[in-house]
Amino acid sequence: MYGSDRDAMRRVFVEAWRKAEAGEPLQPLERLIAEVVAEHPEYHRFLSCDDAGIGRDFPPELGETNPFLHMGLHLGIREQLSVDRPPGVAALYRRIRLRTGDAHGAEHRIMECLAQGLWEAQRSGAMPDEARYIDCLRALAGP
């Protein structure tokens, strides 16, 4: 969306949510963001116009979940599903959804595999390993 400017990326979330709450017209990406934000009321306080979450760190060692990362992973998964990339992800999602009973829960399970793959890629300085990601999803989907 905005390269590596963390605050600019976070402002996209804040602005999309502000527009959604105000009933203003939304661009397609803003609509997707607003849908994800609506599913996470626990994060609404970080999306207020007073920049409550823009510059804040969310250290995992203190037990904090980064709401922007979490919601961004939801967006990434939905993008993957819309284009079935990596190939087979959409079919695996459907199987995982059947096992979990709901779309949001399925995304959370998939998120574990996606976050792990992204972390490994960042640590090694390589591209994410799609085959390993798909293997992780297959394990979640079951037989």
Image (cartoon, grey):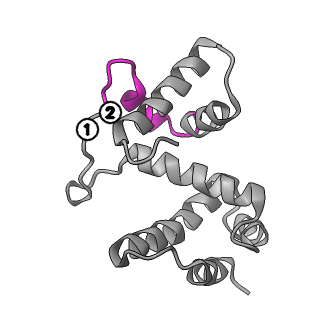
* Residue sitting at x 64%, y 36%: 29
Left or right: residue 18 versus residue 56 is right
Q: Secondary structure at mark 1?
A: loop
Which mark is drawn over residue 53?
2
For the C terminus, give its image quadrant.
bottom right
Say which element carries label 2: loop
Query: Which is nearer the eye, 112 or 122?
Result: 122
Q: Amino acid at mark 1?
A: Arg
Residue 125: numbered disc: none
Residue marked by disc 1: 56
Residue 91 position in % (x across, y down)? 79, 71
Q: Which of the 4 quarters of the picture holds residue 119?
A: bottom left
Is the Cβ of the residue at disc 1 closer than 8 Å to that at disc 2? Answer: yes
Query: Seen in the image, is 12 located left or right of residue 124?
Result: right
Give the residues in magenta: 38-54
- Residue 78 image point, x, y percent: 67, 53
Write down the quadrant of residue 132 in the picture: bottom right
How many numbered callouts? 2
Height in image: 75 above or below 116? above
The residue lying at 39 percent from left, 48 percent from top is 4
